Every structure is written in structure tokens, then in C-alpha cells.
Image: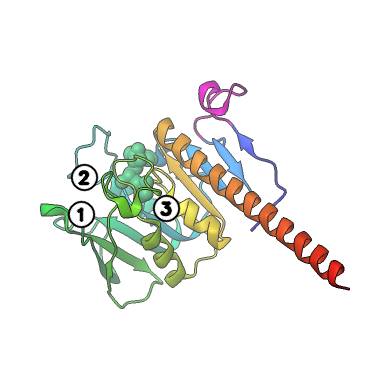
């Protein structure tokens, strides 16, 4: 999907190449076309967030120490207005919200010891059928995903996120713990408006870079196909 909307780029001088101060809170950190990123604790944006069709998110797990200050994740998830919710969750903890409609398993064939699978809970108007998704995890030394790996400690595989989006067919998506922006990349590819939030600037920056790279790839592919079209026309003219 191409769009002529201007890019709002509020990254720090170092990150953005020297123009604007970082924007925290309710002003977007990055906005282009269908994608908006906020640099903020999600709990501080709850009141200003528009309702969405799908909340697809992978929270900082309450039992997993990454040096993050873990918010009251269940409270945040419960207070985001969304018709459907798909929420990644540790295999050994009780669901983050009451009464899930579906309980999916993400099985990682390359997972390590205690982390061979995670849960993905479905709430609201999602399909009731529970499924097993077998998709390799992104590990820094896993060559299959070397090109995709951006060095976020919990980056999710695009293949899995694409599939979840495809099966849910949402009209708009929010990821309130977006990390490196995998949900946003998949949403953008599918032409679905998406909001991402992260409380750490380094991850907002990582996500913004991934999305800008996507833009570049699209533009380059566009240029390549323009050039191919021109060559084909010249070829046809030459044959006349
Ligand atoms: C498990 S990671 C998400 C990874 C993401 N799915 C990806 O593919 O890169 C959780 C993210 O939540 C962020 N986070 C932690 N506390 C937060 C809060 N209060 N509000 C918003 N984001 C928060 C962390 O910085 C981290 O990037």
C-alpha cells in the first residue's frame, strides 16, 4: 500500500539524523500512512486511545525478568477497548483476563528447555477454535531468521503474526507492548491501520526503523517494477 501522507518523525537527534526532539506521551513518536507509534507507558495512554478492532500484543510477561518495570499487564489489557483480543502469555501462568474464548499454543521447534511453547489467548469476537501454531522462534543464532532478527530480546516471528492477523481479518489493530514493531510491520503489509506503543525509546526507534525500511523496500520494488515496465514497453516498441 502506498500513501502520500507526510511522515511525522519525532525521534531524537541521534536517531533521526538531527532534527527534532523525542516526543513522549500522547503526541506520536512516529506516524506515516497507516502506522502510528507512541513512546509512552501504555497505561498512561488508555484514555486517549481510540477503540480498535483487534488488540494483538505480546506483553512483558509477569514472570520474566528483562530489567523492565512490569506494569499491571492484566489491568492494561482489560482496559483497552477492542472487539477482539489476541494476547501472548507464558505457558505456566493463568490467563491474563477471565474467560478466554480460545487458547492457542505457539509451539517453537527451535525453542529452548522450558520455553518450547507459549500461549496465545483469544477474547471477544474471535473464533472459538483453539489451534497449535508451529513456527520457529527468532533466536540470534538461528540462521533461518537471521535477516529478520533486529536484536529485540523477545522479537516475534513475522510469519506467526501475519497468520494471526490474516485469520482474524481486523479493520484496525493496536499493539500496546509493541517492542520491535512486528505487529506493525505485518499490519502495514496487509494495509491495516495500526497503533503501536512502547515505553522504551530504543524499541520505538527499532520499530520506526523497521517501518521506514519497509517503505524503502516498497519504493525500491516500485522503482524496479517501473523500470521493468519501461523496458518491456521499449522492447514492444522495438518489435513493431
Ligand atoms: C515482549 S516485548 C514485545 C516484543 C514484540 N512482540 C516484538 O515482536 O518485538 C514487550 C515490550 O513491552 C514493552 N513495555 C514494558 N512495559 C511497558 C509499558 N508499561 N507500556 C508499554 N510498553 C511496555 C517493553 O519495552 C518491550 O519492548
Looking at this view, is 219 or 54 the one in front?
A: 219
Residue 115 in the image: x percent, y percent? 16, 54
Q: Residue furthest front?
A: 239
Q: Earlier in the sequence, mark 3 or mark 2?
A: 2
Please say whether residue 19 is one of the residues in the magenta stretch: yes
Q: Which mark is residue 80?
A: 3
Region rendered in magenta: 10-25
Q: Secondary structure of the magenta portion, mostly?
A: loop
Looking at this view, is 81 or 12 the one in front?
A: 12
Q: Which one is in front in this view, the residue at disc 3 or the one at disc 1?
A: 1
Looking at this view, is 31 or 42 the one in front?
A: 31
Q: Is residue 141 left or right of residue 181?
A: left
Q: Residues within 10 Å of mark 2 (few under 14, many from 20)?
A: some
Does the CB distance between marks 1 and 2 fall below 8 Å? yes
Q: Quadrant of residue 177?
A: top left
Helix, strand or loop under label 3: loop
Helix, strand or loop under label 1: loop
Does the CB distance between marks 3 and 2 fall below 8 Å? no
Disc 2 designates what residue? 62
Disc 1 designates what residue? 90
Does the CB distance between marks 3 and 1 fall below 8 Å? no
Say whether residue 209 is visible: yes
Q: Quadrant of residue 91?
A: bottom left
Residue 17 in the image: x percent, y percent? 58, 25
Q: Quadrant of the C terminus?
A: bottom right
Amino acid at each position: 500500500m502506498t500513501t502520500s501522507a507526510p511522515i511525522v518523525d519525532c525521534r531524537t537527534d541521534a536517531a533521526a539524523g538531527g532534527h527534532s526532539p523525542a516526543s513522549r506521551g500522547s503526541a506520536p513518536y512516529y506516524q506515516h500512512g497507516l502506522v502510528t507509534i507512541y513512546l509512552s507507558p501504555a497505561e498512561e495512554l488508555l484514555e486517549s486511545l481510540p477503540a480498535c478492532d483487534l488488540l494483538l500484543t505480546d506483553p512483558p510477561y509477569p514472570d520474566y525478568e528483562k530489567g523492565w518495570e512490569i506494569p499491571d499487564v492484566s489491568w492494561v489489557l482489560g482496559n483497552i477497548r477492542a472487539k477482539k483480543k489476541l494476547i501472548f502469555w507464558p505457558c505456566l501462568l493463568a490467563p491474563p483476563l477471565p474467560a478466554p474464548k480460545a487458547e492457542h499454543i505457539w509451539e517453537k521447534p527451535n525453542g529452548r528447555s522450558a520455553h518450547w511453547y507459549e500461549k496465545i489467548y483469544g477474547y471477544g469476537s474471535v473464533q472459538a477454535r483453539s489451534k497449535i501454531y508451529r513456527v520457529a522462534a527468532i533466536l540470534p543464532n538461528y540462521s533461518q531468521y537471521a535477516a529478520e532478527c533486529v536484536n529485540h530480546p523477545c522479537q516475534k516471528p513475522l510469519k506467526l503474526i501475519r497468520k494471526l492477523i490474516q485469520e482474524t481479518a481486523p479493520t484496525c489493530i493496536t499493539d500496546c507492548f509493541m517492542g520491535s514493531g512486528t505487529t506493525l510491520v505485518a499490519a502495514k503489509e496487509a494495509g491495516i491501520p495500526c497503533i503501536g506503543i512502547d515505553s522504551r525509546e530504543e524499541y520505538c526507534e527499532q520499530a520506526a526503523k523497521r517501518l521506514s525500511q519497509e517503505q524503502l523496500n516498497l519504493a525500491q520494488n516500485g522503482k524496479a517494477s517501473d523500470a521493468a515496465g519501461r523496458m518491456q514497453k521499449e522492447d514492444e516498441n522495438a518489435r513493431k
